[in-house]
Amino acid sequence: MTRDQLHFFFLNIGHLLDHFFVLIFATVAALVLTREWNMTYSELIPYATPSFIAFGVCSLASGWIADISSRRGMMAVFFVGIGASSILASFAQTPLQMGAALLIMGVFASIYHPVGLALVIEGREKTGLPIAVNGIYGNLGVGAAALLTGILIDTAGWRTAFLWPGAVSVLIGFAYLRLIGIPKRVNRPPKKKAKSAQTSTYRRFFAGNNRLLIRVIAIVFISTAMGGTIYQSTTFALPKIFDERLAGLALSASLIGWYAFLVFAIAGTAQLVVGYLVDRFPLRTIFTIVAALQVVFFLTMPGLENWPAILVALAFMLAVFGQIPINDVLVSRIAHSDWRSRIFAIRYIVTFSALALAIPMIAWVYGNWGFDTLFTILAGAASVILLTVIWLPRTIPTPALESVAAAE
């Protein structure tokens, strides 16, 4: 394995851990804390809201610090920090203490997306497939959170679900420092050259049409906001959805975790397929199909139980995960390397702000009407994405190959 391949592997593991840690609480709250702390699901999950706010808001600062210092250094901070905050969460005795630990976790979790994704695509001309592979690891983290947490709940208690993964992440952080390291000096191309490359990219595609540029950016942010709401609602609530809808199968916490993991893991392959397709076919066509499938399957889900519920849940998660690399590819094609971490950061502020708002929405909708109403709302959000994507230009340019040094 080359050094670049090893680094790509670490970045993929980082994406897995990022989504893993922020969703441990979702399973613990759904399966244990409602009984242990004598609170309803609707009362408990809002304590995760500050974490997801930090997840989004702090991403801009994370991207800015990485761009002016070292992206690799920020990745090391990510591994150690998110692991340490998870260990802290394992000692929580009250909902308020848990919320505080999750808030700290959200701050460190905010590092990965603006920094890790910028490192994933550095020096690459075709970005769809690398982003898709990286996205699959993120989805495995989503699934592993439900699976490993369920197993640890049944075998060793819910506190170990935070404790042991946290310790592993800290060790991975030190391994990253040892094997990848932080460059002593960051070499960037002269500012004039960077400005020229950026200007030529915009001129070739937008031909001085500022309205077209604004339109593409608006589409990215609208689809990001709606997609973030859908993604958070489905990934956070799926363990509880399965706990309710699979009652006829008499599942333990471990088995619920297994079903959720299998759905997330299989659905994650959609990112690989979509990543391959957007490098070879018009992005607008692929995006339209993915958005339309979300609408169809969300409208199909209300009222379903047991195996039909599992199959339709798998179908809509395939569409939800399939959308993830599309927005990242759009950003990678219009953003110059020197600003890419910050552009990713702005996009993820929108994404994770939607994620943060989704948490109280889940609590409110579930507490008043149940999950069937939530699925109808998500179908509406997917419809907004579908209508927005129609306004995308038929073709989006592939950026010229940029040096690794420029992105580092």
Image (tube, helix red, strand yellow):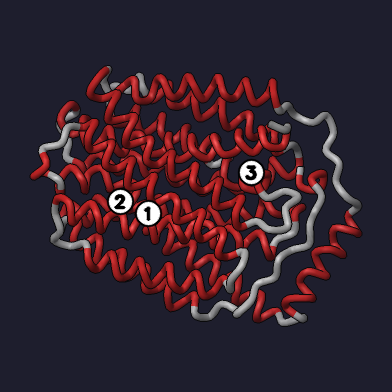
**Badges 2 and 3: C-beta atoms under 8 Å apart?**
no
Q: Residues within 10 Å of mark 2 (few under 14, many from 20)?
A: some
Q: Which residue carries the number 3 mark? A: 115
**Which quarter of the figure has residue 115?**
top right
Q: Position of residue 18 (x, y in %)?
A: 49, 38
Query: Along the polypeptide, which appears first: circle 3 or circle 1?
Result: 3
Using the rendered image of the protein, determine whether residue 286 is visible from the camera's viewpoint: yes
What amino acid is at disc 1?
A: Leu
Residue at 78 percent across and 69 percent down: it is 201
What amino acid is at disc 3?
A: Val
Q: Secondary structure at mark 3?
A: helix
In this rendering, the label closer to the viewer, 3 or 1: 3
Q: Position of residue 284 (x, y in %)?
A: 54, 74
Residue at 35 percent across and 66 percent down: it is 294
Q: Which residue carries the number 2 mark? A: 360
Q: For the N terminus, give its image quadrant.
A: top right
Q: Residues within 10 Å of mark 1 (few under 14, many from 20)?
A: some
Query: Along the polypeptide, which appears first: circle 2 or circle 3?
Result: 3
In this rendering, the label closer to the viewer, 2 or 3: 3
Q: Residues within 10 Å of mark 3 (few under 14, many from 20)?
A: many
**Badges 2 and 1: C-beta atoms under 8 Å apart?**
yes
Residue 208, placed above or below residue 175: below
Q: Which residue carries the number 1 mark? A: 357
Which residue ends up furthest to the front in the rendered image?
1
Question: Cα distance, mark 3 to mark 1?
Answer: 23 Å
What amino acid is at disc 2?
A: Pro
Question: Cα distance, mark 2 to mark 3?
Answer: 28 Å
Is residue 365 rendered to the left or right of residue 406? left
The mark total stands at: 3
Q: Secondary structure at mark 2?
A: helix
Which is nearer the eye, 251 or 170?
251
